[in-house]
Image (tube, rainbow, N blue to C red):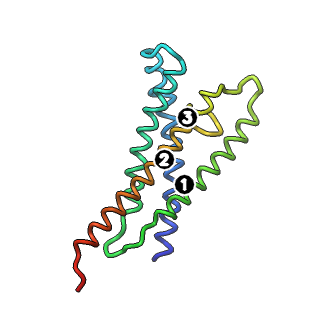
């Protein structure tokens, strides 16, 4: 049973990262960037604002997903944080390699500028640096929340 839970946590980490990057690309391109550019005059400031709002959304998604994945079952004190983070790291590395291939296959006159490369969710190879940081931060904060809840429960129980 322990191996199944570890594999499930690992697979959940991979799916979390994939879902977060897909959601950030959809939200950033379709829902946020056009309306924000109409309100904010500067192109770089609009890109930064859209990236920050998207990263906040991804952080909340990663926190909730991580909390559901990492909360222990009844009577189990082992945390699966390292397995979930391993899945996130594997998915991050895979997306970086895939992004490098996509970037290498693009035409030379289609190269993004530095701000677009770092902040835009649809631009390979980083797929939005704030989104990557938000996924890791959300999963780590969920792990810390689960761990603090686990220690609080273990302190209130009295040994028999």
Please tell me whether mark 3 sits on a helix, a strand or a loop.
loop
Q: In the rendered image of this protein, does residue 121 appear above or below residue 140? A: above
Q: In the rendered image of this protein, does residue 108 appear above or below residue 142? A: above
Q: Residue at x 45, y 53 (%)?
A: 139
Q: Residue at x 47, y 28 (%)?
A: 50
Q: In the rendered image of this protein, does residue 99 appear above or below residue 79? A: above
Please tell me whether mark 2 sits on a helix, a strand or a loop.
helix
The quarter of the rendered structure image containing the C terminus is bottom left
Q: CA distance from mark 3 to mark 1?
A: 17 Å
Q: Which residue is mark 1?
A: 88
In this rendered view, identify the residue nearer to me: 23 or 141.
141
- Which numbered circle lies on residue 135? 2
The quarter of the rendered structure image containing the N terminus is bottom left
- Which numbered circle lies on residue 121? 3
Question: Where residue 21 sits: x, y (%)?
Answer: 53, 42
In this rendered view, identify the residue nearer to me: 50 or 28.
50
Instruction: Count the marks.
Output: 3
In this rendered view, identify the residue nearer to me: 120 or 18.
120
């Amino acid at each position: 049973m322990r191996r199944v839970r570890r594999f499930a946590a690992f697979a959940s980490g991979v799916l979390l990262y994939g879902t977060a990057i897909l959601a950030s690309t959809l939200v950033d391109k379709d829902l946020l960037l056009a309306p924000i550019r109409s309100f904010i005059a500067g192109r770089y400031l609009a890109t930064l604002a859209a990236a920050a709002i998207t990263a906040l959304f991804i952080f909340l998604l990663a926190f909730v997903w991580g909390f559901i994945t990492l909360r222990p079952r009844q009577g189990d004190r082992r945390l699966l944080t390292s397995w979930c983070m391993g899945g996130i790291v594997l998915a991050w590395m895979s997306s970086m390699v895939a992004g490098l291939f996509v970037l290498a296959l693009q035409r030379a006159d289609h190269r993004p500028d530095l701000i677009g490369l770092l902040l835009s969710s649809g631009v390979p190879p980083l797929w939005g640096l704030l989104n990557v940081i938000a996924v890791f931060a959300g999963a780590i904060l969920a792990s810390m929340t689960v761990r603090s809840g686990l220690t609080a429960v273990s302190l209130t129980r009295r040994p028999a």
